[in-house]
Image (spheres, rainbow, N blue to C red):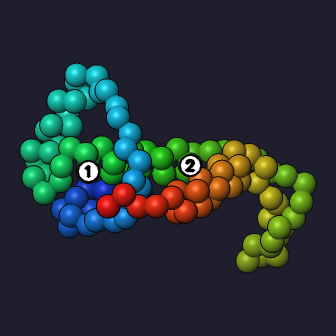
Amino acid sequence: MKFRELFETWERSAEERRTPNAYAVRLPMHDAAKLATLAEMFPGRSEQDIITDLLCTALDAIEAIFPYVQGSRIVSEDEHGDPIYEDVGLTPRFQSLTRKHLQTLRTEPDEE
């Protein structure tokens, strides 16, 4: 999710399923002031919602900047018939570990 999409989501106040886990954070004062400002600017969003959305957006951005590292195995061809090599960088490991942790979270009982 890009930050522009994030603001559009806040304006629509969309809701999605959340993990039963709670994560506590202590913000620097200046960031806490910015958080309070966003909550005031978007009254339909709680500070917790805004933190969640910002974190989700930041995690997507981090995944997007992992560099592609070309492996030796051809996994596909592009529209011109040129080989596409496997990515042996951080992206595949990140995605694999994310799937593993997502499966674990999905099997945990909801506390709602």
Q: Where is residue 1 in the image (x, y as percent from the top left)?
A: 41, 58
85 with respect to 59 (left or right):
right
Residue at 15%, 37% (x, y): give it. 36
Q: Which of marks 1 and 2 is nearer the N terminus?
A: 1
In the displayed structure, 77 sits above or below 68; it is below
Q: Nearer the viewer, residue 90 or 85?
A: 90
Q: Classify mark 2: residues with Cα within 10 Å, few (<14), some (14-19) or many (20+).
A: few
Residue at 56%, 49% (x, y): give it. 63
Query: Residue 99's quadrant in the figure?
Result: bottom right
Q: What element carries label 2?
A: helix
Numbered label attached to residue 57: none
96 with respect to 102 (left or right):
right
Is the C-beta separation of discs 1 and 2 under 8 Å? Answer: no
Q: Is mark 1 on a helix, strand or loop?
A: helix
For badge 2, the amino acid type reads Glu
Q: Mark 2 points at which residue?
A: 63
Q: Where is residue 8 in the image (x, y as percent from the top left)?
A: 25, 62
Q: Mark 1 points at which residue?
A: 49
